[in-house]
Image (spheres, rainbow, N blue to C red):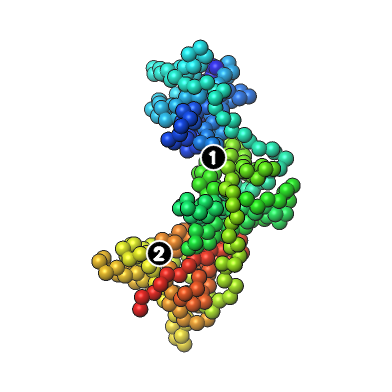
Amino acid sequence: MKVSCLQENLARGLSIVGRAVGARTTLPVLSNVLVATDDSRLKLSATNLELGINCWVGAKVEQDGAITVPARLFTELVNSLPPDRIDMELQTRTQTLNLRCGRFEASIKGIDAQEFPIVSAGEDGRAVSVEAETLRDMIAQVTLAAATDESRPVLTGVLTAITPTGITMAAADGYRLSVRSTGLTVPPEAQARVIIPARALQELARISADEQEPIKIIISPSRSQAFFRLSNIDLVTQLIEGTFPDYEKIIPRSRTTRTVLNVGEFLKAVRLAALFARDSNNVLRLKVEPAGDLAPGRVVVSATSSEVGSNVSELEATIEGEPIEIAFNARFLADVLGVLDAAEVALDTIAPTSPGVLTPVGGESFLHVIMPMHLNR
């Protein structure tokens, strides 16, 4: 192998695949990154057998070849080199990769590429295309509700349903539920209902930050893997086996009070209260008071800590229904308000002991259910 590429392009490619490198693995080759020529480009691959990423980097290829080298060492070396052209040459007999950049030279001992697991890209014919920005928004709005505790693996994933009309993603951790849908311009060839690890979707959102073209989603016929294809990147993840809870039963179908607030003002008040709530189990109180004869509707956001102090914010709101005082987890509330892309949010409540439902005003595609916390009178 003999290949040349720009330092900044190689560094960016390594940052993309780096998060898929196996940590504390018993297979040494999984701690490596595959460096290979592929159709006049340089291909970088990494996998931990649960998540795999391929990334293609523009390069000048003089001689084809492939090698795997220690990911951490290779990445730190490339990041330390000047922004210049890097020339790489593989000594096949010793499985050593020689690098030259300006006045700097290095040699890295590697492992034969034949030992590296293949990171597949899926069958193109089964692909469903989603606008990159839309998919990033869906991931941000849904994965925040996925569990981080591995005791119930299905809750660490995102239920993804692909139907003729669109895609729906849902995640729940026992305290909150997020559901987001989007339509499809072209109906899928096959329907699917699978659980995708939330961490894999968060990684997809990270590596697709600059992507402009639609992202192709492919579910393997065996329902064991999901593939995401970008312009110069492929991501593949193992799916989670199991049955996702029937989240439709969690969503309240009635309300006694609807409170409409400005998202920015509400988020600011919640974040201020969260500073005091974190020392008292994150309890944040909302006191909803409908409009009187002379006064507009208002919501009082407050948090109290016996050790730190207290905070109170008053917000104007449009309120329909009964007055109510209800408590939520301040961090959970800040999480969902932070991913809303609307100017106003509607909070539907029934009673202090019933879940609250948040939806962006003017948008039917997103819904968030949050469980209340116990109020000490």
The residue identified by callout 2 is: 330
Q: Residues within 10 Å of mark 1 (few under 14, many from 20)?
A: some
Question: Between residues 281 and 73, which one lies in front from this camera angle?
Answer: 281
- Number of dots carrying numbers: 2
Residue highlighted by disc 1: 50
Residue at figure coordinates x 57%, y 68% from the top left: 251
Which corner quadrant holds the N terminus?
Answer: top right
What's the residue at 47%, 18% (across, down)? 97
Q: Position of 76 compared to 182: left or right? A: left
Q: Is residue 233 above or below residue 147?
A: above
- Picture coordinates of residue 101 (x, y %)? 43, 20
Q: Residue at x 35, y 78 (%)?
A: 377
Q: Secondary structure at mark 1?
A: loop
Report how far apart the C-alphas of labels 1 and 2 lie in the structure.
Answer: 33 Å
- Give the image location of residue 336, x and y in percent: 48, 60
Q: Residue furthest bottom?
A: 293
User: Could one spot residue 296 in this view of the protein?
Assistant: no
N-terminal of the two: label 1 or label 2? Answer: 1
Rendered location of residue 129, percent (x, y): 66, 46
Q: Is residue 190 above or below residue 7?
A: below
Label 2: element kind? helix
Image position, residue 238 (x, y; %): 58, 42
Residue 52 visible in the displayed image = yes
Residue type at mark 1 is Glu
Q: Is residue 317 left or right of residue 104?
A: right
Question: In this image, 265 relative to 45: left or right?
Answer: left
Question: Quick one: label 2, few (<14), some, or many (20+) residues within 10 Å?
Answer: many
Q: Residue at the spot x=48%, y=63% of the render?
A: 175
- Residue 335 vs residue 219, the one in the foreground: 219
The label shown at residue 205 is none
Q: Nearer the viewer, residue 271 or 54?
A: 54
Outermost residue toward the left?
A: 307
